[in-house]
Image (cartoon, rainbow, N blue to C red):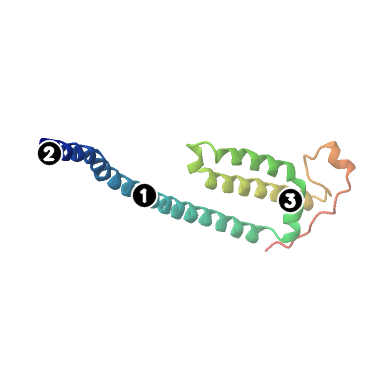
Amino acid sequence: MDVVIKALIDAARSLVHPIILIILLVPMLIALAVWIGVSWAYWGTWTTVIQNAVLDHASFTWSDHADAAEMRRIFEIARGRLFLLGLITGVMYFIPPFNLVAPVFSALAFIHLCLDELQRLRSAGAQGLGEMQGLGARNKKRRMAPPVTWANP
């Protein structure tokens, strides 16, 4: 009889640890799943809203200011600066404190650069220079397209 009671006590002791583990681990796993799911949904929603607002504003800015020919000309002239700006702002996405504002900063930086180039393009066209101000000697060797004309509203 003592052997049977001792075997039952040993069996109960061996079951205590797995039961405690299940009691503690299951709620922790449920909480982790909820936490991850809610944070992904929250972060994904707000980054989507912010990026859509900024990028929609950027597209409206371009369509309000430049036509297709001017945009092609700007992308041709400022290709190197746009690439460098893309590298710099792309690195910001990997730095934890900055990646929260990187989408907005990137969009605003590209808008600023392109609108500045548009202003330079139009001022060069208005003065009849035939090419942009500030271009280096290497660009003077290349055949440049004639300046784009536009109608003032």
| CB atoms of marks 1 and 3 within 8 Å | no
| Residue at the left extreme, as displayed | 1
Crowding at mark 2 (Cα within 10 Å: few <14, some 14-19, many 20+): few
Closer to the eye: label 3 or 2 = 2
- Residue position marked by numbered label 1 in the rendering: 33
Q: From mark 2 to mark 1, how far is it between C-alphas? A: 42 Å
Which disc number belongs to residue 5?
2
In front of the other: 146 or 138: 138
Q: Name the image quarter holding the N terminus.
A: top left
Q: Earlier in the sequence, mark 1 or mark 3?
A: 1
Q: Is residue 148 above or below residue 92?
A: below
- What residue is shown at x 79% (from left), y 57% (from top)? 148
Residue 151 in picture, x, y percent from top left: 73, 63
**What amino acid type should be assigned to the residue bearing mark 3?**
Ile
What residue appears at the point 85 percent right and 54 percent down from the top-left corner?
Answer: 146
Amino acid type, label 1 = Ala
Contact (Cβ within 8 Å) of mark 2 with mark 1:
no
User: Dot 1, how many residues are within 10 Å of its Cα: few (below 14), some (14-19), or many (20+)?
Assistant: few
What residue does disc 3 label? 74
SS at circle 2: helix
The numbered mark, 3 or 2, whose residue comes first in the sequence reads 2
Indicate left or right for 92 with 145 as reference: left
Q: Is 143 rendered above or below residue 134? A: below
Question: Looking at the image, which is closer to me, 87 or 147?
Answer: 87
